[in-house]
Image (cartoon, grey):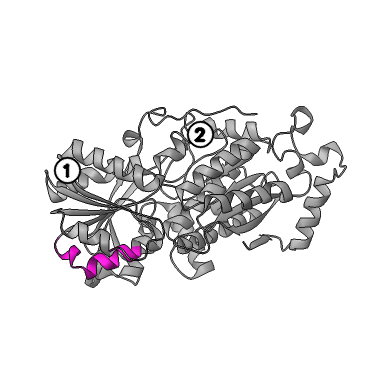
Amino acid sequence: MVTEIGGGGGVSRRAIMKRAVGVAGGLALPLGALGPAIADDAPVGTYPAGVSGSSVFIGICTPRTGTYAAQGEDEIKGYQLAIEHLNAGDDLIKKISPKTTKGVLGKEVQFGIADSQAKPNTAVEAQSNFITQNKAMLITGSVSSAVAVAINKLADREKVIYLPCISGSNDTTGKDCVRYSFRECFYAQTAAQAIAPIMVKTFGKGKKIAFLTPDYTYGHTVRQSMEDALKTQGEWTVATNQVSPLGTTDFSTYLLNVANSGADVVININFGRDAVQSVKQAQQFGILAKMKLVVPYYTPFLADQVGSDVMQGVLAATDYWWTLEDKYPLAKMFNAAFKAKYGSNPEWGANAAYMQIAMWADAVERAGTFYPPDVIKSYEKGVTVDSTVGPVHFRPEDHQLVRPVIIVQGKKTADMKGKDDFFDVLEIVDSAPLMQKPDAFGCKLGGYT
């Protein structure tokens, strides 16, 4: 596992580690140097050690190898841009976090990056190292919901705030919710409730479904939510549910069963490289010539990697699509900054990463302290903030962001206005009416200390 250390101010890895060691060794500082409210608050997690110097540290752990590597690298771009903007006091950050000047509460933001390989144990080890060695005040990153759930538990135990990035399972803010975690992205329930009525309207009632489902919490909760929504709204039934291990490369056995199922619609829940391989192989099997394809939880880069000819007409639910800049001023600002830095339009993982960091800065600035319980309570006030998808806020009961779900449909190649103009935005669906009651999936937040 390779770990990178960096930040907006050119501070070397050696300097950061030296500072971390100094803090761990009980570096004596005047009380005023510890930041606001320290005199009145008992130590919690990495506080106050993590804010004893002139900087604050964020631990980023996301897959850089394996089936979710492309999505992990996309997240990293969003995190790096957000941290760069925080340290510079960029206007976009200030739109989301109005009290920000430079850094967070005047402290420069430093960060480290580790490869989770989409494995929960690897991610827990990496984030534990950031907590113990670097006194991370914030940990973030995920593509796999299994990783997000594992880090939820770590964060709650260590009393360090955690922000999942991509995590589609209902469980993340459902039965596995914790006080120390907040999720920005859409998830199984809202994806299903947003896309199901459009599927029924497009394809009709009484259709048969073939599911392609990855075998872990994300796949199973998306499948269940889709099945429930389509049964209720359109009297759809399940012809087959083909469950495959994460990292599958040969889907032929599963696709043969799909081909013989008599289904009208293939709902592919696979993510990352698994989604790419399964869609390509379904096309090769001739399945997509006979059955409609729906992607209820769109994986970044899928259209680019399978081609617009395969994706044309495909319905998908997503967290963000770059043409939202035509509607939302902050999306336009974000796209422009991202493109200037990286030379391409952002995918939704990068946007989610950026927004998580920006909203954390806002919560800290409004709290006026890094003291974790106060930052959490700042989030829990449910203050509406502007975002790249319009006004959003966190639900205090389960720490889920109330934000729209974007429904897109693949364009014909001839209708594309550029190499990455893959989708038309069909609907921007308000998620508040789509969301389950806060306790419906078993969420019981723990204590603050």
Q: Residue at x 68, y 60 (%)?
A: 5
Nearer the observer, disc 2 or disc 1? 1
93 left or right of 274? right
Whether residue 102 is visible to the viewer of this picture, yes or no, is no
Magenta region: which residues?
A: 276-290
The amino acid marked with disc number 1 is Thr
Quadrant hosting residue 437:
top left
Q: Is residue 385 magenta?
A: no
348 and 234: which is toward the camera: 234
Mark 2 or mark 1: whose residue is earlier in sequence:
1
Return the x and y of residue 60 as percentages of the image width and height: 59, 54
State the SS at label 2.
Answer: loop
Q: Residue furthest front?
A: 253
Whether residue 26 is visible to the viewer of this picture, yes or no, is yes
Q: Which residue is mark 1?
A: 237
The amino acid marked with disc number 2 is Val
Quadrant hosting residue 158:
top right
135 left or right of 354? right
Q: Residue at x 20, y 35 (%)?
A: 232
Q: Residue at x 56, y 28 (%)?
A: 446
Asked if the residue at tag 1 contacts the one at tag 2, i.e. Cβ–Cβ closer than 8 Å, the answer is no
Quarter of the image where the N terminus is located: bottom right
Prevailing secondary structure of the magenta residues? helix
345 and 20: which is toward the camera: 20
Return the x and y of residue 7 as percentages of the image width and height: 67, 59
Q: Which residue is mark 2?
A: 383
Count of residue discs: 2
